[in-house]
Amino acid sequence: MAVISDKDRKKSAGRAVSCYFCRNKQALHMKTKIAIVGTGGVGGFLGGELARRYAGSETEIYFISRGEALRKIRERGIRVDTKEGSYTARPAAVTDRPEEIGPVDYLIYCTKAYDVENGILQAAPCIGPGTVVLPFLNGVDSGERIAALLPDAEVWLGCVYVVAFIVEPGHIAEQTNGYRYLFGSPAADPAKLRRLADVFAAAGIRAWAREDIVRCVWDKFAFISTVATVTSYTDKTYGEVLGTPEYRGWLDELLREFRAVAEAKGCELSEDVEAAVIAQMERIPPETTTSMQRDFRAHRNTELESLTGYLVREGARLGVAVPTYDRMYAGLKERTV
């Protein structure tokens, strides 16, 4: 995919802004509050893009962060390195006290899957009667887990394709050949969907509402579950997995087992999802590692249960054999913190 120059991107964003204003002049005076929970790779990159585009505008971008990232962003803003250049952006506020922000229109949740319950409860002061909660998390069960905690909230589904990681707290690097954020819900308020889609479009961000979001989420899970599992188990990069016949064979086995479980659950997958997973890996720099793999290397908490264990447990529940998942899950369990 060709890299868009900063000049072309500004022109594209300008056209999006013009279309947005022509389509909905009332939005010029509509205050929109968006809180980003988590300033790691996924949330830090998206939050940085939003904060850069909407500085000083009626669309207010807030970060909920903690620790060293909170301190650094307060001091200097969030630094983001992209394939198109680097920049520093400042949100309307960054805090570890969500009550300082109050209820928002959209709470975009971008932590690790294992931290859903604690994080959502901590962010509760930002969730009012009209708040939409949009998780951009790995796995397929985050929406259900959030909805169980917030039965009265409007919880959407989201999935993201982006290679972004923490260089240091408050400093994010994005290295994707065509990132994209997808979101929606079969039960979503259409007006709220359009409003958020317009916010992203006017900012020149590659994020779209999808009617088929359930299939999108499962297609993404096919990628993240199989790739995170094989790279973590082998501790090899994308390029090494694809270039080593034994490892590539293991990946193919994981993809076959994944489809078998999805079909047994009645979950729709794209017909060519296996080829799409390989093609996506080939588009990403060959030295890339997965976040779960990096967490294992650093002896941190991992998303093993959401990304690998989930398939093992569902396979057992549904009577579907998943021997490759079983073997890798058992091996990785021995290495967990």
Image (cartoon, rainbow, N blue to C red):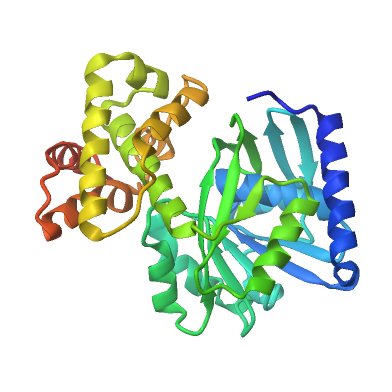
Seen from the viewer's position, the closer of residues 206 and 307 is 206
- The reply to whether residue 40 is visible in this rendering is no
Q: Is residue 270 left or right of residue 309?
A: right
Q: Position of residue 81 (x, y in %)?
A: 69, 32
Q: Is residue 170 left or right of residue 136?
A: right
Q: Position of residue 63 (x, y in %)?
A: 67, 59
Q: Is residue 310 left or right of residue 170?
A: left
Q: Looking at this view, name the residue that lies furthest to the front.
A: 271
Examine the image and state in which quarter residue 55 appears. bottom right
Query: Which residue is at 42% across, 51% downward?
Result: 138
Location of the C terminus by quadrant is top left
Location of the N terminus by quadrant is top right
Examine the image and state in which quarter residue 206 appears. top right
Query: Which residue is at 83% across, 31% downward?
Result: 8
Q: Position of residue 186 (x, y in %)?
A: 50, 69
- The reply to whether residue 147 is visible in this rendering is yes
- Up-down relation of residue 283 to residue 308 (above or below): above
Q: Position of residue 292 (x, y in %)?
A: 38, 40
Query: Which residue is at 71% across, 62% downward?
Result: 62
